[in-house]
Amino acid sequence: MANEITAHYGLPLPDPAAFLEYDVFRLRDAITGIDSSLHQAALNLAQRAQELDALIEQRASALAQSKLDVTATVGVANGGTGATAAASARANLNVPTRTGGEASGTWGINISGSSASAATAGTANSATYANAASGQWTGAAMNGDSAGADTTSSVVIRHAGGAGDGALAAMSFVCAGAYGIKMYLRPDGYFGIGGSSRSPWSWYTDTAGNMVAGGNVTAYSDPRLKRGFKRIADPFKILNALDGGTFFWRKGIQHTSMKAGRRDYGVLADQVQAVMPEIVTESIEIGGQKYLTVAYEKLVPVLIEAVKELDREVRQLKKDRA
């Protein structure tokens, strides 16, 4: 068993047969060797640690350089937005916000399938059905103008070309399974309502502002709605204060431009206002001007009482001659 050592670290084991001095020398040499080995191992570990630190720093630097600097800009041509702010980026890319803000012009959008909701729409070439729509539909918020050449409005209904009753700019109103009616404009300027469940053009107006109704135009006249009814005592006093005549409509006035220069029949509003002020009202203001209007149908009761008075006088004259 001379020179016996340990299995893992090679440390010398005392030899029972040897002298003590000999084992002491052997242990001294072994410990010195172990010290040298541990020292070398420590140096190797320190070197590996330095190499590892250098590798970590190198990788961190490379990672930092690979990241995009969010304060810089990348041009649109290079796949960027050319801006650091969202608003500027949308302007550069010509896109609106998610809620439709900053949108203008005409956008070609083709949507198929079902749409749960549509809050705002610009120009839609085709929209077939919205059967599940349950909310209120509101047109675009914009100001139109009453000027003749202006077509700006919240909703525009257009036709696809052509002429006649088969080329109307129309919209339908439908109570499913009950009744339907259309409102439409014909290319020659006639505007009216009718069709669907009703005969076409049951009411319309032409380019001169004339209105035609397929049925009667009535006003409330139920005696239960009135109190203090009195017969007109002196109808001739009223009629004698009025002049009925012919005239030509003046040119250059927006209110009556559709019949400018035409010959017409009527009375003078100021004369009517003096004896029947209730049937004279002011028109809508156009171009800073208002004009007097007359409810002509209100002259009918005066004429009725005047005819009755004439009838009584004629009867009396006939009686006196008999």
Image (cartoon, rainbow, N blue to C red):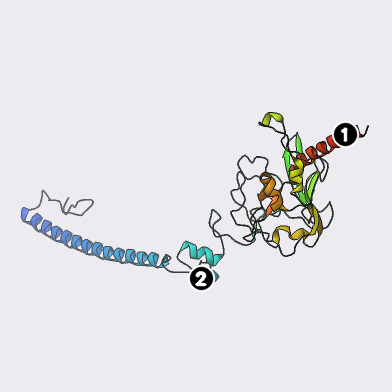
With 142 as the anchor, is 69 left or right in this view? Answer: left
Earlier in the chain: of badge 2 and badge 1, it is 2
**Circle number at residue 75:** 2
Q: Residue furthest right?
A: 322
Residue 32: which quarter of the image?
A: bottom left
Q: Quadrant of the C terminus?
A: top right
Q: Which residue is mark 1?
A: 315
With 149 as the anchor, is 316 left or right in this view? Answer: right
Percent position (x, y) of residue 193? 77, 45
Percent position (x, y) of residue 54? 31, 67
Residue kind at label 1, given as amino acid type: Arg
| Residue toward you, 100 or 5 | 100
| Residue toward you, 280 or 74 | 280
**In this orientation, does residue 293 appear?**
yes
- Mark 2 Cα shell of 10 Å, populated few (<14), some (14-19), many (≥20): few
Establish if 199 lies above or below 38. Answer: above
Q: Are marks 2 and 1 in contact (CB under 8 Å)?
A: no
Say which residue appears at 68% left-offset and 28% top-offset. 224
Percent position (x, y) of residue 175? 72, 37
Residue kind at label 2, given as amino acid type: Gly
Residue 47: which quarter of the image?
A: bottom left
With 228 as the anchor, is 185 left or right in this view? Answer: right
Residue 144: which quarter of the image?
A: bottom right
Provide the secondary structure element on which disc 1 rests: helix
Percent position (x, y) of residue 51? 30, 66
